Image (tube, rainbow, N blue to C red):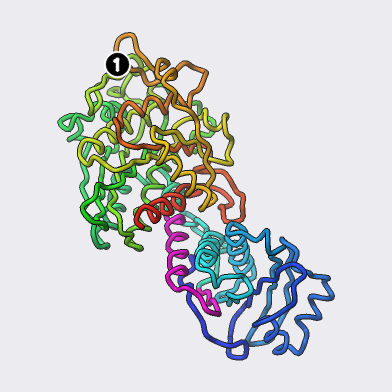
């Protein structure tokens, strides 16, 4: 069950009928507004309960009070000190509220906007993101569900910005959609289905055009690098592009995603342990798809190109071999040293195609590209690399705004020597075991020309992290969707 509706309510306390009414309370502050109204409605029992629990509004503390037939429960959440209350804390609070409400089997709840400081638009947006993300669950393949979320409707009481509320819910839903894509099993979520989902989104929205190319067209298109990866798969590879024209005549911003719906490693076969997690190797494309969904709903005033290369990487009699040499779309030849370094090969053609056909004003790509980034940075942030300081600064600013942390790694020219091949232009591995993430970055740099570009390696953040509270308990995280939409929103101003 997903939250269906987040809406504004003008009901007074006495007119409200709800399973749970939630209030925020700053540390060591006086009660006021609707919390005082609730105390009066319940004949002073609210303040008595706060006193009994010695509740002062400390962060991570709360008080639960049982009410009557109209307001069944009241939950007061400590906001901590005013100067330490930030937007990520509000996003976390939103997640905790929806999680608690589902644990109580609430169907509808009410939230007091004033006490949570939701009269500020940015605060309201992130709070609504948290409400949606805290309620996320993935139960599509459970034949018998013993416990499922019940929360359907959230009423926010007070003077609020309706567009901020809508944006928060849409971004939350878009991240949830991205998570769903990552969590589907690879026998269901094939490249064909991924392409169909993109077509469905664009066909039901304004200002979009959509194109999809089949693997049978790759050689004629000059996609020698992508085709090499796709050769071993029995499920047909797809390359699809959605063009969004929400701006004027300016060049579009491009988003490119790696969509390996399953990665066995190919002939350079991976170890069997945890190979099931290689269904998550399409999470770069899931990021792009999540942003696509948000853009379709919110229609920002900017032109955007969404491009995804999707295939499986499988061993087969016709599969690519270590030692092969392929020619990418931009004419560069690539020596294949390891078929498990395949994501960069798919992106090589996707990036150079987008550069050639669209000449974008800027470009980002997203990929679960290297295990090395897990070692270098752990799962607390994504690795980023790029060729343009201004775009990198925009990405870092949006990372701060969305609290989707990133850390920049260098792409110094000295690293480019590590991917030089003796018999081709470049090779698909660096100087192992050193700087594996950077080696992948300088490889991709060969295919973006002079276009301002940032690469985001999400191999450590795309699945697994369970903190803070708006992260899922397991599975795909939908990383990057909120960051990228913030960047696009800022570029559309």
Q: Can I make out residue 145 in this image?
A: no
170 relative position to 406: left or right: left
Query: In the displayed structure, would residue 362 be above or below residue 106?
Result: above
Main secondary structure along the magenta-highlighted residues: helix
> Camera-side residue: 66 or 250?
250
Let me know if residue 263 appears in the view: yes
Compared to residue 72, the image places residue 206 above or below, namely above
- On the image, which quarter does residue 146 sit in? bottom right
Residue 103, compared with residue 412, is above or below; it is below
Residue name at image x 42 percent, y 55 percent: 177
- Residue at numbered disc 1: 425
Residue shown at 60% from the left, 75% from the top: 114
Residue 304 part of the magenta segment: no
Q: Which residues are magenta?
A: 153-177
**Near-viewer residue (20 or 233):** 20
Dot 1: element: loop
Identity of the residue furthest to the left in this view: 220
In this rendering, position of residue 469 left or right of residue 222: right
Viewport quadrant of the C terminus: bottom left
- The location of residue 487, given as percent across then percent down, is 41, 50
Q: Residues within 10 Å of mark 1 (few under 14, many from 20)?
A: some
Q: Is residue 160 magenta?
A: yes
Is 410 left or right of 62, judged from the image as shown? left
């Amino acid at each position: 069950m997903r939250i269906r509706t987040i809406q504004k309510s003008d009901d007074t306390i006495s007119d409200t009928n709800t399973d749970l009414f939630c209030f925020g309370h700053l540390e060591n502050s006086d009660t006021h507004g609707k919390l005082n109204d609730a105390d009066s409605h319940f004949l002073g029992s609210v303040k008595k309960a706060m006193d009994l629990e010695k509740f002062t509004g400390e962060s991570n503390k709360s008080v639960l009070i049982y009410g009557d037939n109209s307001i069944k429960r009241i939950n007061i959440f400590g906001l901590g000190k005013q100067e330490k209350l930030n937007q990520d804390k509000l996003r976390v609070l939103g997640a905790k509220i929806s999680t608690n409400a589902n644990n109580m089997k609430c169907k509808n709840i009410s939230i007091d906007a004033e006490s949570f400081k939701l009269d500020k638009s940015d605060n309201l947006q992130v709070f609504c993101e948290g409400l949606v993300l805290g309620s996320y669950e993935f139960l599509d393949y459970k034949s018998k569900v013993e416990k499922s979320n019940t929360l359907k409707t959230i009423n926010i009481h007070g003077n609020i910005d309706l567009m901020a509320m809508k944006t928060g819910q849409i971004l939350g839903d878009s991240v949830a959609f991205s998570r769903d894509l990552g969590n589907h099993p690879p026998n269901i979520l094939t490249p064909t289905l991924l392409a169909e989902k993109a077509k469905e989104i664009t066909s039901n929205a304004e200002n979009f055009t959509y194109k999809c190319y089949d693997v049978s067209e790759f050689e004629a298109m000059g996609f020698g690098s992508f085709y090499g990866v796709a050769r071993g798969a029995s499920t047909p590879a797809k390359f699809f592009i959605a063009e969004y024209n929400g701006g004027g005549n300016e060049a579009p911003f491009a988003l490119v995603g790696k969509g390996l719906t399953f990665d066995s490693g190919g002939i350079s076969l991976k170890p069997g342990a945890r190979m099931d997690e290689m269904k998550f190797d399409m999470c770069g494309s899931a990021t792009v798809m999540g942003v696509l969904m948000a853009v379709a709903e919110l229609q920002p005033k900017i032109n955007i190109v969404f491009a995804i290369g999707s295939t499986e990487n499988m061993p087969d009699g016709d599969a690519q071999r270590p030692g092969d040499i392929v020619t990418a779309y931009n004419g560069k030849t690539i020596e294949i040293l390891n078929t498990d370094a395949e994501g960069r090969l798919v992106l090589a053609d996707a990036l150079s195609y987008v550069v050639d056909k669209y000449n974008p004003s800027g470009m980002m790509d997203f990929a679960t590209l290297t295990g090395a980034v897990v070692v270098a940075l752990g799962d607390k942030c994504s690795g980023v690399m790029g060729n343009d300081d201004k775009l990198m600064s925009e990405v870092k600013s949006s990372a701060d705004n969305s609290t989707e942390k990133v850390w920049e790694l260098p792409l110094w020219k000295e690293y480019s020597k590590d991917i030089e091949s003796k018999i081709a232009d470049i090779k698909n591995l660096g100087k192992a075991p050193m700087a594996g993430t950077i080696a992948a970055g300088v490889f991709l740099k060969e295919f973006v020309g002079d276009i301002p570009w940032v690469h985001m390696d999400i191999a450590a953040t795309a699945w697994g992290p369970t903190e803070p509270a708006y992260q899922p308990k397991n599975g795909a995280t939908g990383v990057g969707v909120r960051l990228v939409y913030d960047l696009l929103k800022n570029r559309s101003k």
